[in-house]
Image (tube, rainbow, N blue to C red):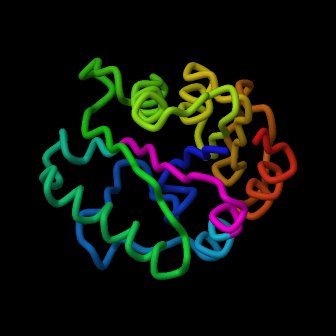
Amino acid sequence: MAVFLDREGVITPKLPRGVHVVTLDQAVLAPGAADALRLLTEAGCRLFIVTNQSGVARGYLTRGAADAVHAHIVRQLADRGVVINDSRLCPHRDEDGCACRKPKPGMIADLCDQHGIDPARAALIGDSPSDVVAGLAAGCAVRVHLALSGQASNAATHRADNLLEAVRIILEVRYD
């Protein structure tokens, strides 16, 4: 099974609106994230990160710096036994009208095409309604909304209070 993961609020701590991770020392894992995601890796799931990073378009950091921060997060996960198979980063703002910024499904669709993933046999974990809507638009069968932000998502198939609960839900409804 393929699992698509949002980054901020899922893998890394939720940031206040308008705050962006711009340096490697700010790129830390959320407590328990590596342990929860390692369960998916050990179960044979393929993990993919899909993250909106408008700080690039807003000039807070360069695309190179955003890629370096992202690579640092992926290395931290790898050091803890989590395999991230691939990822996509959208550097645009909402008003740019790109096809990749969630809630549009572009990043997920691109990864599905590149890796031969049937989205009807895939899951998404996100902490915002736009994450869940992107999963719905891409055809992901399982869409888990982390309730950390207090926002609700009508497009979610499941709701979880934390990442470990979300992982357990996915492992219970595996399709492969």
Does residue 159 appear to the left or right of 37 in the view shown?
Answer: right
Front one among 41 and 145: 41
Q: Is residue 109 magenta?
A: no
Q: Is residue 45 left or right of residue 4?
A: right
> Residue 85: percent from the left, percent from the top?
46, 54
Answer above or below: position of 75 versus 10: below
Residue 113: percent from left, percent from top = 43, 28
Question: Residue 22 at x, y = what percent?
Answer: 24, 63
Quadrant location, the N terminus:
top right
| Residue 41 magenta | yes
- Between 12 and 39, the residue placed more toward the observer is 39
Q: If the image is split into quadrants, where does the C terminus sit?
A: top right
Give the image quarter of residue 152. top right
Q: Residue at x 16, y 50 (%)?
A: 63
Using the rendered view, name the quadrant where residue 99 is placed: top left
- Image coordinates of residue 127 in percent, x first then y, are 61, 46
Q: Is residue 141 left or right of residue 104?
A: right
What residue is shown at x 66% (from left), y 36% (from top)?
Answer: 122
Query: What span is colored magenta in the figure?
Result: 39-52
